[in-house]
Amino acid sequence: MSPDAEAYRILRTNIEFNRKNPEDNAITVVSGGAGEGKSTTLVNLAYICAQGGYTTLMIDADLRRPRLHTFFDINNSVGLTNYLTTELMLEDVILQTPVDNLYFMPSGILPSDAAGILNSRRMSELIQDVKQRFDLVLVDSPPILGVSDASVLASEVDLTMIVVQHRKLPRNMLMRVKQAVENVGGNVIGVVLNNVDVRSDSQYQYYTSYYTYYAPAESQIGSAIGSSSPTTAKPQAADRSKDSELY
């Protein structure tokens, strides 16, 4: 019952209402550069979706610097790359997390030609297969500026969500991110403005102020005595002064 968890519920709702086709359930999450909160946003969104009853699969397709396995303390030595280069079955590389309805495919051993492995017929078949098995498929990718992997993934899935750290990259760089997705036929569903400091950006204070108004009495009491640890935005919570929004 924290503002952080509520921000991810709003994000989940916005995704649902912005999907023109209910069958468009494979979404890749990209960013322009490293350290913008892409993987953290994906994991928390996946958690909230699973909590809401969606059978959710996370695929770590960041074959440069995979991070998703660290959120769950899972070994990533067997996963996506093993499936794409061998005859392994999906059941061999998809793991169930401790969270109900939440499943995970690690990256596997990092290859020398990440883009080549991802740009393959077996990868296309994998996406089509998991789309039938899960309500929602979230694919993590490397930063889209500088490497071609993320563009390949954007062309394979239904939708692309861009995560932008507030005030990190100039506007022209953000336009390049959007253009890189559209150049390969990707469909941008929206942008998550991440890591907004609501204390210095007054236009975003309505998130926490509205939440305080509508929150259960117990949560308001907890806030009054200085409790600052979100209870539901697991597995990794953010600073309560910061939020995310899908545009």
Image (tube, helix red, strand yellow):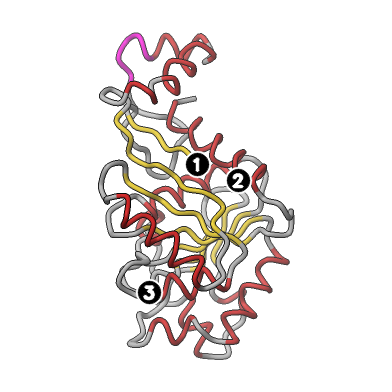
What numbered label is drawn on residue 197?
none
Q: Residue lying furthest front in this view?
A: 172
- 228 lies left or right of 45: left
- Kind of residue at disc 3: Leu
Provide the residue designation for mark 1. Answer: 246
Q: Is residue 224 magenta?
A: yes
Q: Earlier in the sequence, mark 3 or mark 1?
A: 3
Provide the residue designation for mark 3. Answer: 63
Q: Earlier in the sequence, mark 2 or mark 1?
A: 2
Q: Secondary structure at mark 1?
A: strand
Question: Does 173 appear above or below 3?
Answer: below
Percent x, y of residue 166? 31, 41
- Kind of residue at disc 1: Leu
What numbered label is drawn on residue 15?
2
- Kind of residue at disc 2: Ile
Asked if the residue at tag 1 contacts the one at tag 2, i.e. Cβ–Cβ closer than 8 Å, the answer is yes
